[in-house]
Amino acid sequence: MRLAPSILAADFAALGTAVEGVSAVADLLHVDVMDGHFVPNISLGPPVVTSLRKHTDLYLDCHLMISDPAAYLPAFAEAGANGCSVHVEIGRTGELIGQMRELGIDAGLAVNPDTPFDAFAEYLDQIDLLLLMTVFPGFGGQAFMPEVLPKIRRVADEVERRGLPVAIQVDGGIDERTVQDVAGAGATVFVAGSAVFGATDPVAAGRRIREAAIAAGPPRP
Ligand code: DX5
Ligand code: ZN
């Protein structure tokens, strides 16, 4: 399992310190990019990724909640993103995956809570990461949507059946309680914003989420 603290919940005026503060418990850093168009909120863009890159060696995983990723993927790759996820709802998915491959970054596909399995199944063998949203994107601190669990299970079954090297990431309302359900359903990468950065001790909070996920996940040899 891997834990991905979402910097959306961090203090943007002290981002370097916040990132350093969670590096002991973070496997990757989740960077939420919102354009005020695909989602009704604006967060940050490539210059912040450039700054983060200078501060950390952590894997920078950019979740692009933007309407026109084709226009901005080169800037994120140039800024030092290790991987990007584009939303399947905007279309041109095959082209965008090709563009991420050409740019030499990991290719991720993000999926809204109400987008069905059939809308992205055909891309499962072309991507490195599938980001299943467990809230509607746009804001941190929303309540986890348990109705997404059957989709997570279906993806995990399909990935295992076909032996695909796809990481299954969940994002939205993940804390030490809800992580048990998503880990039990087969997710392997856990994004947590408020549950980590909103805690008095973010490292301890991250460790509790990690332990809960390991305890609830599939048995290991
Ligand atoms: C929501 C973002 C999430 C968000 C998660 O639009 O994609 O990554 O930061 O925040 P929490 O963990 O607070 O739900
Ligand atoms: Zn996100």
Image (cartoon, helix red, strand yellow):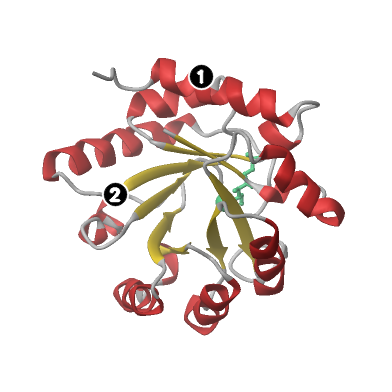
Instruction: State the residue position of label 2.
Output: 166
Q: Is residue 192 above or below residue 111?
A: above
Residue 94 location (% of width, % of height): 29, 73
Task: Using the rendered view, name the quadrant where residue 161 is placed.
Answer: top left
Image quarter for ligand 1:
top right
Instruction: State the residue position of label 1.
Output: 211
Dot 2 alpha-carbon crowd within 10 angstroms: few under 14, some 14 to 19, many 20 or more: some
Residue 27 location (% of width, % of height): 52, 41
Q: Is residue 120 left or right of residue 63?
A: left
Query: Which part of the image, by quadrant, shows the C terminus?
Result: top left
Q: Is residue 33 left or right of residue 71?
A: right
Mark 1 residue CB less than 8 A from any atom of ligand 1: no
* Viewer can see residue 9: no
- Secondary structure under tag 2 reads loop
Residue at position x 60%, y 73% in the image = 79
Residue 140 location (% of width, % of height): 68, 45
Tell which residue pokes out farthest to the bottom in this image. 71
